[in-house]
Amino acid sequence: MQMERSIKSLYVRKLNESHFCGTSCQQLISVMFQALLE
């Protein structure tokens, strides 16, 4: 879906902007996205 893709790019951009966000945060976001896309 177009909306899911835009939301995903938005989250990726936020992750890139957030310096305090570590690998654990990125893993959590990726897991959430996998659950959303399934």
Image: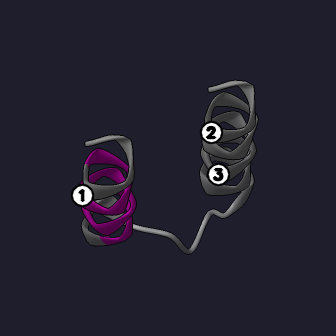
Q: Look at label 3 and name its amino acid.
A: Tyr
Magenta-highlighted residues: 25-34
Q: Look at label 2 and name its amino acid.
A: Glu
Q: Which x, y percent locates residue 23? A: 29, 60
Q: Which x, y percent locates residue 9? A: 68, 34
Residue lying at 72% horizontally and 25% vertically, measured from the top left: 2
Density class for disc 3 (Cα within 10 Å; few <14, some 14-19, many ≥20) is some
Mark 2 lies on residue: 4
Q: Quadrant of residue 25?
A: bottom left
**Numbered mark located on residue 31 in the image:** 1
Mark 3 lies on residue: 11
Q: Label 2, secondary structure: give it.
A: helix
Q: Label 3, secondary structure: give it.
A: helix
Going from N to C along the chain, the mark reached first, 1 or 2, is: 2
Density class for disc 1 (Cα within 10 Å; few <14, some 14-19, many ≥20) is few
**Nearest the eye: 8 or 20:** 8
**Nearest the eye: 14 or 36:** 36
Going from N to C along the chain, the mark reached first, 2 or 3, is: 2
Residue lying at 62% horizontally and 63% vertically, measured from the top left: 19
